[in-house]
Image (spheres, helix red, strand yellow):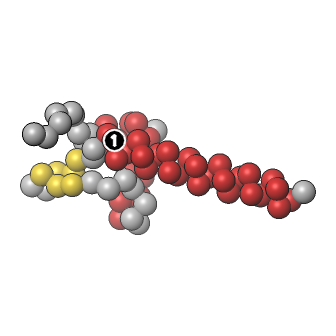
Amino acid sequence: MMQSHTHLTARQLAELLNVSKRTLETLIADGQAPAHYLIGRTRRWDPVVVQAWVAERTAARTEKLLGADIGGK
């Protein structure tokens, strides 16, 4: 049986990421947004996938910044 939880709309995801819907569309077109699925022509995002995507990007950014600090010394 599938676990039931609410999946995000594009508007909700844009609000969560603190970006405009237009910026989200650009991220999607560039392949830089979290993975989504379609119901008809409507995109939906699994909050668990979004959380993992944010964590991955945050870790990569932190690693990059820490690497720059270490390399710059």
Which residue matches tag 1? Answer: 48
68 relative to 18, above or below: below
Residue density around tag 1, few if under 14, some if 14–19, many if 20 or more, within 10 Å = few
Image side of residue 72 versus residue 18, left or right: right
Residue at far front of view: 1
Query: What is the residue that sits farthest to the bottom in this orientation?
Result: 30
Quadrant where the N terminus lies? top left
Amino acid type at image mark 1: Val
Question: Which residue occupies 17% across, 36% down?
Answer: 3
Position above or below: 48 against 71: above
Residue at x-position 34% and y-position 47%: 49
State the count of labels. Answer: 1
Q: Is residue 66 visible?
A: yes
Q: Is residue 46 above or below residue 73?
A: above
* Residue under the image location 86 percent in, 59 percent down: 72
Give the structural element (helix, strand or loop) at label 1: helix
What percent of the width, then of the height, locates residue 4?
A: 16, 34
Q: Is residue 2 left or right of residue 26?
A: left
| x and y percentages locating residue 18 in the rendered image | 46, 38
Q: Quadrant of the C terminus?
A: bottom right
Find residue 59 and report its horizontal and vertical position in percent: 58, 49
- Residue furthest to the right: 73
Residue 37 relative to residue 32: left or right: left
Of 73 and 8, nearer the camera is 73
* Residue 65: x %, y % from top left: 71, 52
